[in-house]
Image: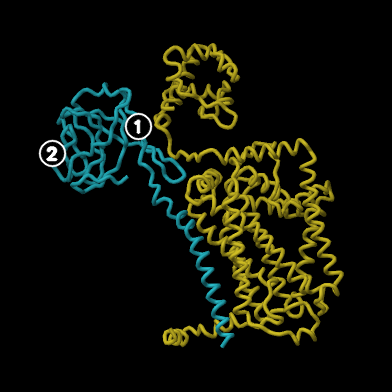
Chain colours: A yellow, B cyan
Amino acid sequence: MSAGGDWLDRRVGWRSLMHEGLDEPLPGKSRWAYVFGSGLLFIFVNQAITGIFLSLYYVPSADHAHTTVAFIQKQVTAGAFIRSLHSYGSSVMVVILLLHLWQTFLYGAYKNGRELVWLFGCALFLLVLGMSFTGYLLPWDQKAYAATAVATNMISEVPLVGSAIKTLLRGGTEMGTLTISRFFALHVFLIPMGIIGAIGVHVLLFRRAGAAGPPVDEATRQKLPVEPFYPRQVFKDFAFGIVLIIVLAAFALWRPTTLGPMANPSDPTYLPRPEWYYVPVFQWLKYWHGPLTVVGVVLIPALLFLLLFALPFIDRSPERRPLKRPIAVGSMLFVFVGLLWLGARSRAEDHQDPSVRAKLQAQDDEERRFAATPFEPEVAGVASATTRKMTDAESKGALLFVSEQCAGCHGPEGKGGAGLFALPSVDAMFPGEKLKAVLRAPNQQMTEGGMEPVALKDPELDAVIAYLRFLTKGR
Amino acid sequence: MDDVRRRSFLGTLVAGISAVVGAIMVVPLLRFAAWPMFHGGGGADWFALGPADQFTGETPVRADVEVRKQDGWRVSVAKQTVYVTRAGGTLRVLSAVCTHLGCVVPWDAKAKQFVCPCHKGFYAPDGSRINGPPPRGLDALPTKIENGTLYVKYQYFRQLSAKRDVVG
């Protein structure tokens, strides 16, 4: 081992790398408070691995995205588990990120030469929010579509360039298949590249500046006992990472993430609700109307983020003890309590309004119902009935099928759809002249379904019948 | 010395636990990725060709079948040509795919045999090989008769092999 190790060390220099990586001195010894940064790295790796595996089946387009996610969720072995790890992972990421931010903030670890570490940390915060925003749309179910429609509409509040940015982001004025492609590219290529780069700089600058240690005055700090990063801090970091993975896996098994019915842009009654960490923002938007909207939606959030980024340049005293920094700690606390309050208000308002509560409940029920139905594959290619060229009578019937409003209730090509009645095999149900008779005078069951007698002249009705036979052959 | 021992103990502990958790997590990932290996799909569905007693003659009758196959998250629908024949006494449904290089073989009514237009392969009305480059006769497809209706299950076979080998 040692001979081989020496051989490799002469060529790679791994011992000095290990020394550099593991023997970093920690003033004030290892602490559980320091585990959050490594925890984020663990979750990031979890997201990357599960994300790559999900991409084995996922297709980013409006007509396949939802089917492929349903396929992952309902059909593929461990699909629901892996998708849940990815989806819950994003929530855990936000939680740990906030804890990391709070720890760094309370310890004053952004001061004394660590300003750029903080700056890149803030950039990572934004990038992670970007990941959850772009990833949320990808399943293309009702809630994903509705939430993203609202969020992208917010962008158009930005003065001058807002609607241009919105169109660019959506790949058009409306949300559609190009939106998925764009969000996918951002979610899978662009933002992760940014995250990996920013993590690199963040960690590099942090190691260069050295661990800040506990928030004490400089004189005490000089006298703190020092311990290397390895083994105790490494042990704590790994222990935390393993607990995170176990908690995630337990949640993923116990309560797999859900998938609602496919996005239906024409349903105006759907009540969108964002992921929990965007709920405070969602509530905040309710308070801003008319010309002031731009203040609430754009200016104030932008200002808050600017303050967050600029914190080490505003709060420049070397003092790190939280109790001696009442203004900084107070403002941060104010913002967070405010966000919590907004989140609670949103929950309360949803709960108090009986119609909203009922609607949200109905949406949840619909999602559960959809989750319980077996996977239905997409049919590619065309059934034999429609591959044959239509006869003249059949094409005439096809035109009448639309102009006489048959398609209004039976769907295009009589295939039905949400709330529509798909045509059965008419040949099997009404052979010969029976079909004509039943179209002229619908039976009781049809009448109850809303079918009206067809008042066409004989040759036209014959054309419709020819088309119906053509359409439903083999159904 | 104690310090060194403690370091290596903690290091081994971390490595050991991580390896166990990692190994457990790898199982669902592998099963997820390997899913298609164990769910190749049962091939095509049965396709109804029509009443079995309509096929009476010795002359092969051409029919188009719709091949519905599970293809991951979609079902693909393709059309394939088959011949129904009672030549030789038994009802057979033959794939029209030449066993040589896969051309679609038409029935030559005048010569009363199948003639592959690509490389002159000849088959008898019951599908057996007569002459030419094909290594075996036309392939008979699995059939069943239910309530008088003839069903066929479309299959693909390996070309250029004397043995019948289903490939999909």
Q: Earlier in the sequence, mark 1 or mark 2?
A: 1
Q: Residue at x 29, y 27 (%)?
A: B145
Instruction: Please determine whether, in this image, residue A404 is positioned above or below residue A250.
Output: above
Residue A9 versus residue A255: which sits nearer the camera?
A: A255
Q: Are marks 1 and 2 on the same chain?
A: yes
Q: Is residue A17 left or right of residue A159?
A: left
Q: Residue at x 65, y 57 (%)?
A: A91
Horizontal and vertical percent position of residue A99: 71, 65
The residue depicted at 78 percent of the width and 53 percent of the height is A297
Pinpoint residue A219: horizontal percent, then vertical percent. 80, 86
Residue placed farthest to the left in the image?
Answer: B131
Residue A115, label in figure: none
Q: CA distance from mark 1 to mark 2?
A: 29 Å
Reading the image, the residue beneath label 2 is B130
Q: Are marks 1 and 2 in contact (CB under 8 Å)?
A: no
Of A291 and A328, nearer the camera is: A328
Q: Position of residue B3 (x, y in %)?
A: 59, 85
Dot 2, crowdedness within 10 Å: few (<14), some or many (≥20)? some
Asked whether residue A152 appears in the rendered view, the answer is no
Name the kind of residue labelled 2 in the image.
Ile
Q: Is residue A216 left or right of residue A166?
A: right
At mark 2, the secondary structure is strand
Identify the residue at horizontal 76%, vertical 63% (top origin): A305
Chain letter for the residue marked with disc 2 in the picture: B
The reply to whether residue A57 is visible in this rendering is yes
Query: Is A304 situated above or below B68?
Result: below
Under mark 1, the amino acid is Phe
Of the 4 image quadrants, the one containing the N terminus of chain A is bottom left
- The residue identified by callout 1 is B47
- Going by the image, does A337 lie left or right of A448? right
